[in-house]
Amino acid sequence: MAPMELIIELLLMPLVAFVVGMMMVLMMRRIAAKLQRRIGPPFFQPLYDIVKLHSKQTQISHGLIHDIGIVMAMGGYIAAETLLPVPGMTGIAEKGGIITLLYLMMIPSLGLALGVGQCANPNGSIGIARALTAMLAYDIPLVIVIFGVAYAAGTTNLVDIIAVQQAGGFETWGAVQMPVLAIAGLIAMHASLGKQPFEIYIAPAEIATGPMVEMSGKYLGGLFVMQCFQLYTTSVLYVSLFLGGGTTWFDFLLKSFLVLAIPVSIAYLFPRYRTEDLLRLMWKWPVMLGLIGVAFVL
Amino acid sequence: MSSIKQIPVITERKGNPLARVFDEFVRFCRSRSLFILHYCTGCGAIELPPAMTSRFDMERLGIQPMVSPRQADILLITGYVSIKTLKRVILTYEQMGSPKYVIGICSCTVNGGMYWQSYATAKKLDEYMPVDLYIAGCMPRPEAVLAGLQKLMDRIHSGEANSWEDYFRNYDYYLGNQQKLFGENWQTPTDIITEAKHYDLIDEGTFGKHTQLLEQHQKPLEALDMRLGHDLKEPTE
Ligand code: SF4
């Protein structure tokens, strides 16, 4: 690939992810509104929020590590986007592979932990401790699921995994070939979104939004941007692993939005678990399902 | 404070038309995305849940509840403020990031309402912090709350809602009233005068005899001592 083309793709992929991510945030809030019989926010609401937060006159920084933490939280996802193939653009997905992607998806939580640590707010520290515990909880089933998929496809290269699934149409999709793994993956993905039954680290009523408690202005804005990327990354990863990626933009976006709609619509019907319950649940059911699924694949 | 001088002057960047478009866009976004921190001090708070949930749905106006003062734009004071509460309200207000707006819901924030004769409530909220908007009523219905919020949105969009600057410009007045209630040793953890210098909002009203009094006894702010363990003894002086 010509270097110029690659640079353009590397710039375009995070940008597309951001725009699609904002639409996903909107969808999430609209679904919540529909479930609660409300009208919900206007179409450009996520954009308004982000612009407003970045244009606040007071920008309270708690120090250098705070700044770096937010940059890491966003940067981790921005780097992850370049490893996620979308229709027509593969970026550096062929060279990176899925293991690098998994590592990059952990960076935001660690960056957040650094940044929040310097805020010296007890609520933030509790929140981040919970966030890291939650990461431990959902990463184990996620790794099992990804191992299963990679083993079945015989490669850790996302582009190849997608190609294998697209080879025979609907029947070769990961979700059809490995339904047990797909269910385990869905649960792990739901937990990694940090939405309601697993919303242990935001918990506004208990620890005042945890990691976000001391964030204001552009720092909170950065976290809003991070949320857009997070939704996009999680759902596109699932689509690439189990639903055969996308051949055209239309079916790619349709699949990603539909996949995201499942956990989001479940989320707003439930209260949340405690940390230890989350750990117990995640290490029992998705891990069990994942191991069964892997046993089928082997 | 209602002398002619306090009428807000809209300063626009002249010349560059792009800058003006940008300012307009930012003002629009500010008016369409408001995070509220509801400080539920009195009975008026009971009208907020219907205003937020299915029946009246604040979110369609872009208004969302938030839980910490750092994240919020609007401070909603819903009802009477007792003197003890007022201290917390002021601390909360000073921690919010500007531009920030204060809405006083209920008659009790306007003039004390039915607590006029109480020794323990602060009567007029705008003696202690600049208030952008009052929504009168005992208690105002959710329609009134939403109408008030829409009015605030219009004012933010047109650039009139900058009463937060007033707190810096007339800090002496507000501090004086606060000292009258809380005693002369009143000090908040936020250094308003340094902040006013930072925003370039120093005016005649910023300094006065009350800020002098503050400077006399002001203790420098120290970072919190972060320690693990159960040693919760109060530091002895
Ligand atoms: S105005 Fe009426 S409803 Fe509101 S706080 Fe006062 S007494 Fe309560």
Image (cartoon, coloured by chain):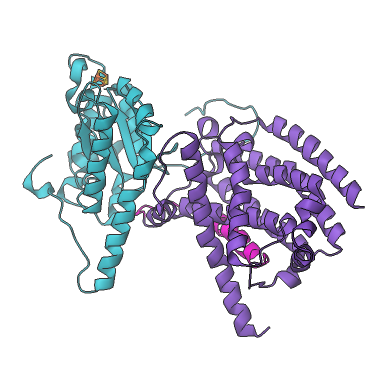
Chain colours: A purple, B cyan
Is A286 located above or below residue B156 in the figure? above
Q: Is residue A7 magenta?
A: no
Q: Residue at x 44, y 38 (%)?
A: B68
Name the side, left or right, on which A102 lies relative to A294: left
Is B188 located above or below residue A4 in the figure? above
The x and y percentages for residue B228 are 64, 34
Q: Viewer-proximal residue, B20 or A270?
A: A270
Q: Viewer-proximal residue, B151 or A127?
A: B151
Name the side, left or right, on which B38 lies relative to A291: left
Q: Residue at x 30, y 50 (%)?
A: B31
Q: Is residue B219 visible?
A: no
Q: Main secondary structure of the magenta part?
A: helix
The x and y percentages for residue B61 are 34, 44
Give the quarter of the image for residue B190: top left
Q: Viewer-proximal residue, A63 or A28?
A: A28
The x and y percentages for residue B164 are 26, 45
Q: How many marks?
A: 0
Q: Viewer-proximal residue, A28 or B132?
A: A28
Which stretch is magenta? A56-85
Q: Is residue A58 magenta?
A: yes
